[in-house]
Image (spheres, coloured by chain):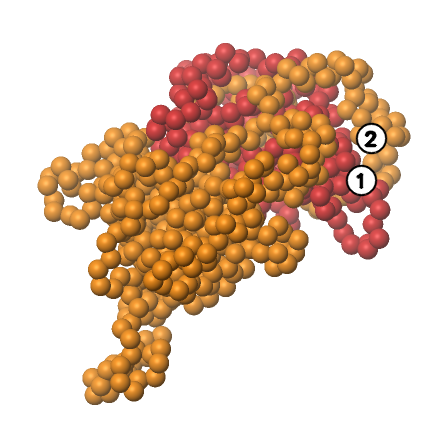
Amino acid sequence: MSTSRSRRDAAGAPALPLDVLKDLERKVLWLATQTIHHANHERNQSDGLKVGGHQASSASLVSIMTALYFAVLRPEDRVAVKPHASPVFHAIQYLLGNQDVEQLKAFRAFGGAQSYPSRTKDVDDVDFSTGSVGLGVAMTSFASLVQDYIHAKGWKTEWPQGRMIALVGDAELDEGNIYEAMLEGFKHGLRNTWWIIDYNRQSLDAVLTHLMTPKLESLFDNMGWRVVTVKYGRKLEALRASRVATGFSDGSTSATTRSIRRSPSKAVPDGAASLSAISRASARRSSTSVRWTTTISPH
Amino acid sequence: MTDLGGHCLETVLEAFQAVPDDRPVCFICYTVKGKGLPFAGHKDNHAGLMTPDQMQRFKAANNILDGQEWSKTAGLNRSEAELDRLLGTVAFNAKGPRRLSDKTIDVGPLPLPPIRGTMSTQQGFGQILAEIARSDSKLAGRIVTCSPDVTVSTNLGPWVNRRGIFARHEVEDVFQARKLMSVQRWHMGPKGQHIELGIAENNLFILLAALGLSHELFGERLIPIGTLYDPFIARGLDALNYACYQDARFILVATPSGITLAPEGGAHQSISSPLIGMAQDGIASFEPAFVDELAAILQWAFEYIQRTACHRQGRRLGARARRRLGLSQAVDAAARPAGARDRGCHGRRYHPGRLLAQNPWRRCRTRHRLPGRGGRGGGRRPWAPCSIGFRLPACSPSPPPTGSAPAGRPPRPPSSTADTSCRM
């Protein structure tokens, strides 16, 4: 435990400068989109049957995965990638030299890069297969339990404990097995597990009509998880920083994650109309689980 | 208003790097579906594909020329050498292949329980494990059992009495501390080798997937055994399929099975699960008829689930990926580890039927199905290593029929005392 902590702390800042990460982010989005485009519009198809792919679902996770793979992940970490974001994973592995271009060109075809990351069929070192949805998410929590089991036996002590990370589609949270796994994780003192929810508020069929964040926050908090809400980017924060009225911090950590709550705007279609009140109430309720360093008063 | 947290590299990096400890974290990252693409946020964009025109404009916006679509540097204003140098510093890649391995564990002959009178294969299974628990073999140390709240009724009790329940910290057994008389003396602590689960079969199969990949994920080989009631396999079937799809290796013991719960009523009889065993790829299922057969197959299974997979896809690797994964250039060596044939990779030497045939006092009456050539999956290699499933009834075979009763049927009780009500 102490080994992994000190390694992680020592790792500190990202290895790559931000401008490089931004370039990579752009490249990853292009490659993932092109991989799907090539499979559907450029590759020879004699039968005219649909190949498919999920350009929008992939785009949703590009920044998060760029940050993770190029700046956060360590060799001992293991990741379950949201099934529909498979092209993003393959693009990143291609840039890192772990995936062949021929595999990308054969995306979804026999012998090519898989539509959903696969340990057995993909060649680019997939940590956990994913799909059907929900199973890969639960897998990270049980893998963490197995990691604890191994360390408790005094085996593999030279290998630092990794973080078991799931990239979770928000619609994926409808799968019941996720909650079965959460309960079991609680009983076993789950640790070293991150679930990163791609909260794009859209599923296959529809747009989310309910405000889910307070529910999710209290749910995870209830199970002993830390909840970090990452709502606005730097530009929006800067825009609002000039209007800061009040703020509070739980002061318990040096963490600087901003969790800013205010009523949703047009571009954040969160559902109900009078949300600012709910948001404020939930902010007070869950102040122990979400680390608030800045709060913007709604206007 | 599209600068949401999940699309801002600085913000997400800050969030990830600020995690102070090992407590589990849920990040709720606001994003826009399709961010950066023409259909960003459109409600119907899920399976939407950009048109060739849109792609052409997107390509131009990225400063990528025709023919440079797959270039790693096009449009980035960086040379290939510079990008390679930068990517060479990425920690994710620092230790080479992420897939670890561990040496196989010697199985040796299993210590057999004394068999007196008749015994069901379920009882036999429990007693074989109890004997293993008594031994100090390497195998005994690497077996991990797990069960969704049916540890006792699937006969794992004696094993758990000896090997204990896993918990990260020592947990006091309040019943034992107060000297309550009980057959179950289950110590909980870091040395425990049984993982007790709540009654959720999805969790059982996903845990088996994680345990069964331990050698590749964490570099330490485990021999996982999961037990559950046979009819409840269906409850976690997709998770079982998921475990098999990942090539996790485990032994699944489904017991009681068949109609051996009939006297308890109609609810828990399992009639269709043999079809699952036959159809599910990645698991070979057995239904041993006798305890000594079970022991022979179990011994074989402990060795069999440790064999290296022969992934077809391994042969499709390019030279660079092959180097990175530490694979030899030779096609065959990638598909089949060196010396595999000598260890009986194709299973012929260790075929359970042969083991059983050598058994001097019993002919093989075990129903079994192994993945073979030309079966489901078409060109799959014969004897591809996989997990093993057992279907074990809870009652011992009926005594041989006597008198004029038709062969193969148990003798009927006198009609005057027969319970004629329908139990199904």
Q: Secondary structure at mark 2?
A: loop
Indicate the quadrant containing the N terminus of chain B: top left, top right, bottom left or bottom right: top right
Please identify the quarter of the rendering in which residue B197 is found: top left
| Circle 1 residues within 10 Å: few <14, some 14–19, many ≥20 | some
Q: Nearer the viewer, residue B117 or A23?
A: B117
User: Do labels 1 and 2 touch, CB within 8 Å?
Assistant: yes
What chain is tagged by disc 2? B
**Are callouts 1 and 2 both on one chain?**
no
Q: Residue at x 44, y 44 (%)?
A: B303
Check residue A56 in the rendering and tell me which mark sits there, or answer none: none
Q: Residue at x 54, y 22 (%)?
A: A74
Q: Colour of chain B?
A: orange
Indicate the quadrant containing the C terminus of chain B: top left, top right, bottom left or bottom right: bottom left
Q: How many marks?
A: 2
Please identify the quarter of the rendering in which residue B172 is found: top left
Q: Measuring from the top left, give residue A82's x and y in whole percent.
A: 59, 38
Q: Which chain is red?
A: A
Q: Residue at x 82, y 23 (%)?
A: B74
Q: Give, as a three-letter code, the residue at label 2.
A: Glu
Rendered position, B98 above or below B227: above
Rendered position, B209 above or below A221: below
Q: Measuring from the top left, give residue A111's x and y in whole percent.
A: 71, 43
Q: Is residue A283 left or right of residue A264?
A: left
Q: Is residue A97 left or right of residue B376?
A: right
Check residue B69 in the rendering and tell me which mark sits there, or answer none: 2
What chain is tagged by disc 1? A
Residue position for label 1: A38
Q: Measuring from the top left, give residue B128's x and y in whole percent.
A: 30, 50
Return the residue found at the far right: B66
Q: Residue at x 53, y 51 (%)?
A: B348
| Circle 2 residues within 10 Å: few <14, some 14–19, many ≥20 | some
